[in-house]
Amino acid sequence: MRREALNVLMHEGDAASGAYLAADMTEASKIYAKLKEMPRVAATSAPRRMLESFYETMARQMLTFAFFNTILAATIGVGVVYNTARIAFSERSRELASLRVLGYRRGEISYILLGELAVIVFLGIPIGCWIVRQLCQLGASPQNDLFRIPMVIEPSTYASSALLVLIAAAVSGLMVRRKLDHMDLVEF
């Protein structure tokens, strides 16, 4: 059907419902500005810009999700390390007090308790990284007909995780060391 006949049938007058343009993308902003000035042009869209906008939106959502997951994981990591140090201190406090009474210095009993914590942390970091890698592969990357998000774990992710655990262990160790220094030897 010719456009003129369709317009008469639709009672629209001389109008077109859409047009596809091939344009030089270096001039895109000028073309969009001209089209927006035209009173009968209702909307303009560019597939490339729509795709870029989609990618930007997905990236923002993923970064927000990753940020909150990171905060949650860091909180859990610090809590686990601190709790391990506190439990080790509680379980060994009587033995450590006995060693102090027998003549061991504070540094020596700290070395015993904090050495155990250090061994646990240094063995736990690579094992934890391996377990996380396996869980990520098990969970697989989200994908459907529209998009696929590949699983990518950068070495810097492992490094920052290990650094967080080491800092948590150091702070927890200092807190436990302080408790060791102020331990009441008569109570035990």
Image (tube, rainbow, N blue to C red):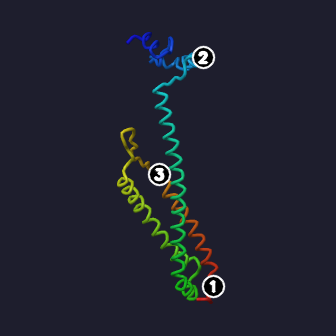
Taking the image as shown, residue 55 lies to the left or right of residue 38, namely left
**Would you identify the image quadrant in which residue 5 lies?**
top left
Q: Residues within 10 Å of mark 3 (few under 14, many from 20)?
A: few
Residue 118 screen position, x and y as percent: 49, 69
- Toward the viewer: 106 or 19? 19
Q: Earlier in the sequence, mark 3 or mark 1?
A: 3
Amino acid type, callout 2: Glu
Q: CA separation, marks 1 and 2?
A: 83 Å
Amino acid type, callout 3: Thr
Q: Say which residue label 2 marks.
A: 37
Amino acid type, callout 1: Asp
Q: Earlier in the sequence, mark 3 or mark 2?
A: 2
Q: CA separation, marks 3 and 2?
A: 49 Å
**Which residue is at 51% across, 44% downward?**
61
Q: Which mark is residue 64?
A: none
Q: Which mark is residue 184?
A: 1
**Which residue is at 53% across, 59% downward?**
74
Q: Of helix, strand and loop, which one carries label 1?
A: loop
- Toward the viewer: 84 or 25? 25
Q: Say which residue label 3 marks.
A: 157
* Looking at the image, residue 104 lies above or below residue 176: below
Q: Of helix, strand and loop, which one carries label 3?
A: helix
Q: Earlier in the sequence, mark 1 or mark 2?
A: 2
Between label 3 and label 2, give the one nearer the viewer.
2
* Looking at the image, residue 6 lies above or below residue 115: above
Residue 156 screen position, x and y as percent: 47, 50
Residue 52 screen position, x and y as percent: 48, 32
**Which residue is at 50% across, 50% downward?**
66
